[in-house]
Image (spheres, helix red, strand yellow):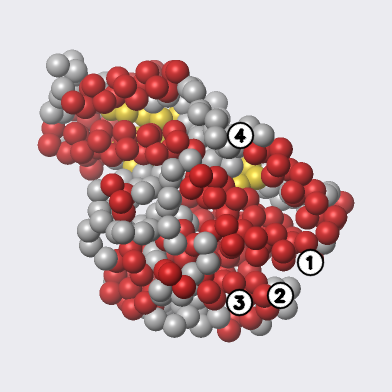
């Protein structure tokens, strides 16, 4: 049988719809490595780019990367703040991993500052930092590509709900896309997304310690949350990256420019002038952006700073958030091994498939 990529695009779509069995494809987006199909029954299916990797030489690489992402996600998938997908499906030799459709990404909220207030922003950062600390506890040291587009959200804030009337958060964060998680120590691939890359990610080869990579990235994200999308470089991130809008300089497309910023001193003037942010949190974000990873706080300390800020802002609301976080933690007890037989079997089959084929046409 021919591989999926050997068929015309229209036939590919029919095969995908038939195998995924979640209705018609209603939309599609692309990332650096993968593409995502949206189905009208509320399911999302991610796979390696068919056009990019759709040939015998590159298909093997695509399958290898997919297995890596599945294995890294599987380590953390028990916690509700990590976006989980079902055991992958092979559609004519091409791997697809399906999950429920979320309501948007953190980037959407950052672009819509009137939809959330300071309490909600801090609660979001508590969730993200807490999830990253959980991932660390189960062996994933660094997500390595932490950015707003990789943080999915459920339950968008609405005008009908006054945050003060609810003792806790209603919008839930879910960290996704573990495709390069811990690649710094496994395969020496250190890169991520440039606006969020720590200085050590620009170094080639295996890193001795990548534990502060996500601390740096989350500090940039926190800056964006509190300044309505501005990056510490002084520009709205999405105005200059990945492609600058009309009227914006093109220099931010160059790696050397981002590296120079990451390794230099950071200007936090815009953040410090934001009246709702206490100076203590501004100082914490500044320390997390230090070019020297050994001078940055640990992720646990960064999470504690968000908690202290939340308690100082509204003790009752902070108490509600704590109860919610504790409840979510109950789904992922520390020290308990996560058993998912269907996923174990699927990962085993994918490894066998990868080991015995030069292209994903069929197992040997």
**Which is more N-terminal, label 1 or label 3?**
3
CA gap between label 2 and label 3 equals 9 Å
Q: Nearer the viewer, residue 141 or 320?
A: 141
Q: Say which quarter of the image contains residue 242.
A: bottom left
Q: In the rendered view, does 145 fall on the left or right side of 166?
A: left
Element marked by disc 1: helix
CA gap between label 4 and label 2 equals 33 Å
Q: Is residue 128 above or below residue 2?
A: below
Element marked by disc 2: loop
Q: Say which quarter of the image contains residue 197.
A: bottom left
The residue that label 3 is drawn on is 283
Label 4 CA crowd tier, 10 Å (few <14, some 14–19, many 20+)? few
**Which is more N-terminal, label 1 or label 2?**
2
CA gap between label 3 and label 4 equals 33 Å
Q: Position of residue 184 (x, y in %)?
A: 31, 54
Mark closer to the observer (4, 1): 4
CA gap between label 4 and label 1 equals 29 Å
The residue that label 1 is drawn on is 312
Label 3 CA crowd tier, 10 Å (few <14, some 14–19, many 20+)? some
Residue 302 is at least partly visible in this image: yes
Label annotation for residue 333: 4
Q: Position of residue 118 (x, y in %)?
A: 72, 64
The residue that label 2 is drawn on is 278
**Which is more N-terminal, label 1 or label 4?**
1
Element marked by disc 4: loop
Q: Say which quarter of the image contains residue 195.
A: bottom left
């Amino acid at each position: 049988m021919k591989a999926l990529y050997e068929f015309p695009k229209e036939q590919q779509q029919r095969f995908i719809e038939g195998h995924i069995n979640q209705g018609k494809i209603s939309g599609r987006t692309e990332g650096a490595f993968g593409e995502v199909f949206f189905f009208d029954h509320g399911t999302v299916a991610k796979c390696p780019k068919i056009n990019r990797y759709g040939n015998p030489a590159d298909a093997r690489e695509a399958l290898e990367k997919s297995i890596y992402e599945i294995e890294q996600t599987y380590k953390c998938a028990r916690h509700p703040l990590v976006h989980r997908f079902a055991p992958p499906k092979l559609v004519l030799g091409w791997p697809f991993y399906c999950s429920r459709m979320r309501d948007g990404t953190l980037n959407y909220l950052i672009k819509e500052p009137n939809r959330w207030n300071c309490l909600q922003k801090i609660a979001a950062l508590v969730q993200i930092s807490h999830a990253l600390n959980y991932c660390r506890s189960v062996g994933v040291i660094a997500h390595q590509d932490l950015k707003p587009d990789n943080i999915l959200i459920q339950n968008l804030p609405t005008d009908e709900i006054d945050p003060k009337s609810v003792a806790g958060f209603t919008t839930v964060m879910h960290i996704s896309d573990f495709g390069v998680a811990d690649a710094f120590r496994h395969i020496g691939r250190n890169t991520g997304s440039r606006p969020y890359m720590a200085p050590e990610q620009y170094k080639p080869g295996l890193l001795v310690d990548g534990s502060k990579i996500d601390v740096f990235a989350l500090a940039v994200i926190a800056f964006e949350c509190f300044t309505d999308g501005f990056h510490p470089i002084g520009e709205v991130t999405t105005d200059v990256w990945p492609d600058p809008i009309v009227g914006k300089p093109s220099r931010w497309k160059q790696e050397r420019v981002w590296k120079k910023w990451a390794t230099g001193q950071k200007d936090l003037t815009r953040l410090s002038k934001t009246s709702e942010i206490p100076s203590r949190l501004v100082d914490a974000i500044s320390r997390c952006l230090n070019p020297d990873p050994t001078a940055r706080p640990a992720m646990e300390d960064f999470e504690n700073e968000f908690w202290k800020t939340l308690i100082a802002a509204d003790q009752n609301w902070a108490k509600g958030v704590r109860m919610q976080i504790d409840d979510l933690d109950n789904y992922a007890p520390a020290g308990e091994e996560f058993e998912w037989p269907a996923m174990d079997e699927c990962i085993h089959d994918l490894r066998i498939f990868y080991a015995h084929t030069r292209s994903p046409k069929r197992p040997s």
